[in-house]
Amino acid sequence: MSFPEHFVWGAASASYQVEGAATADGKGLSVWDVFSHQDGKVFNGDTGDVACDHYHRSAGDVALMKSIGLQAYRLSVSWPRVLPGGVGAVNEVGLAFYDRLVDELLEANIQPYVTLFHWDFPYDLYRRGGWLNPDVVGWFADYTELMARALGDRVKHWMTLNEPAVFVGLGHDLGVHAPGLKLSRKDVFQIVHHVLLAHGRSVQALRAVCGDARVGYANNGTGAVPATDNPVDIEAARRAMFEVTGPDYWAHNVWADPMILGEYPEGWLEVLGPDAPSIGPDDMKTIRQPLDFIGENYYTAPVCHAGDGGAPVRVPEPVGRPYTMFHWTIMPEGLYWTPRFLYERYHLPIVITENGLSNPDWVALDGGVHDPQRIDYTRRHLLQLRKAGEDGVALGGYFHWSIMDNFEWAEGMKHRFGLIHVDYQTQKRTLKDSAHWYRDVIATHGAILDPEKA
C-alpha cells in the first residue's frame, strides 16, 4: 500500500496570513487591511500588519521548508502588493518579492504552487464595486496575465481562487469576513457568477501565457461521510454533497459544475428564482475551461444516512466526539469520501490543497513544541487519503495547512495551525514535533503511516 509515485508532499499558506509588510514598498491596501482595523471585527483587535513578517523573512522560511523536506509549497499572491490600485501601474518592488520567493523555492528544490486569489482583494477596486462590478472579470484576467508573464517561466502549477464560497458567503452575505458586507440575496448570487467568470478568464490567461502549466482551483464545501458501507447510505452521502435543495452557495457543485461541466447544478437557478444571477449568452462557455486538477481544502464533514426515499439525513454527533480547537469535528473518513465523490463526478485528479487542525501549541520548558494531537490527526487523515487512492481516485498531492502559525482571519492570532511555531513577539520560528514527523512521512513517501512502521 503506497501513495502514487508522483504524489507531491507540501504545505500551504496565504499572503495576508503570513506576509505582513501591509504598507511596505508601495503595497496598496486590501479589504483585509481595512477590515482588520475596524473595531470588533477580528479577535483581540489582531491584524495582518506584521503577521509572520514572511515578506522580510522568506529566505529563512524557505530554509525551514527545505529542512522539513517539502516537495512543494502552496503560496498566494497579494493582488494589491503587485497592483496597488488593483489595475494600472505595477509595483515592481512587490512583484520582485514573488520573483525572488519563487527562485528561493526552486533553489531549495521546492515546487511553487501559486494561488492567485486568497481573499486579499484590492481596496481601491472594492470602492469601485468589487466583486459586484462586472468589470471585475477583466480586472482579474489582467492581474492573472501580469503574474503569468512574471512567473510563468518557472511556476508550473496555478490555482485561480481559494474557497470562493467562503469569501463570497462570509464576506458579502454574512459580513463576518472582509469586506464585511450583508448584501441582498440577488447581489450575492450575482457575485457568485462574477467570481466564476473571473475564474474562467483567469484560466484563459494562464493558458495563453504559460501553456504547459497545470491549472486548477482550491475549493471547499459541504461534504458528507456515509453512516455505513450500505450502498443506500453511500448514495445519500453523495447526494448530501452535490444535491442543491435551496438558495445555497456552499455545495461543491455550485462552483465545480460550471467550471468543469459548463452548467449550474440541476434546478439551482430555478430554486433561486428572482435572485438568480444575470447570465450572458457566452458566460457558461467562458466559465468552463480545461482544468488539470481539483484542489480540495478538507477539514471536517458530517455523517449522513439514507432517510425516506433515500434522502440524506444527518446523523447526530455522539457525545464526546473529538474536536479541534476550532470546534470542528475530527472526521478523518471525510478525506476518503470527499476525494472519492469528487473524482467520480468530475474525473479530474484531486490535490488536497489544505488539511490540518488548530491546536493549543506553545513552547515547552525544554524549548520544543510538542503537538502529538497534530501528528495523530494528520496520520489518520493521510491513511484515509491513501485508501482513496488505492480505490482508484487519482491523487496529485497533499498540502498541510499550514506551514507556520499565522493570522486566522476573523479569529486573529488565536488559532495555531502550523507545522512551525511562530512567536509573534520575536518572530522566532520553532519546528514543532509534527514538522519533524512530517519530514519522515515525506522521506518515506508515507510508509511510516502504517502502524507497524510508526
Image (tube, helix red, strand yellow):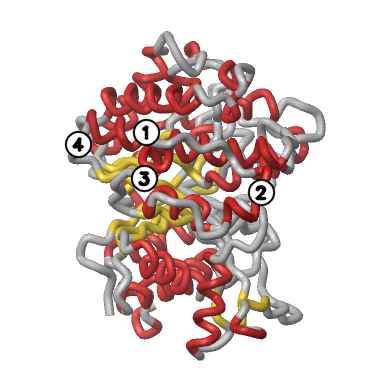
What amino acid does circle 1 point to?
Ser
Q: Earlier in the sequence, mark 1 or mark 4?
A: 1
Foreground residue among 58 and 306: 306
Left or right, residue 355 beside residue 185: left
Pointer 2 or 4: first along the chain? 4
On the image, the x and y values in percent for residue 210 come to 22, 33
> Which residue is identified by label 1?
202
At label 2, the amino acid type is Gly
Residue 3, how many percent across, how many down?
Answer: 28, 70
What's the CA distance linking mark 3 and mark 1? 11 Å
Q: Nearer the viewer, residue 113 or 57?
A: 113
Quadrant showing the C terminus: bottom left
Numbered disc 4: secondary structure: loop
Residue 61 visible to the viewer:
no
Circles 4 and 3: CB atoms closer than 8 Å: no
Q: Position of residue 234 (x, y in %)?
A: 50, 81
Q: Helix, strand, or loop for circle 2?
A: helix
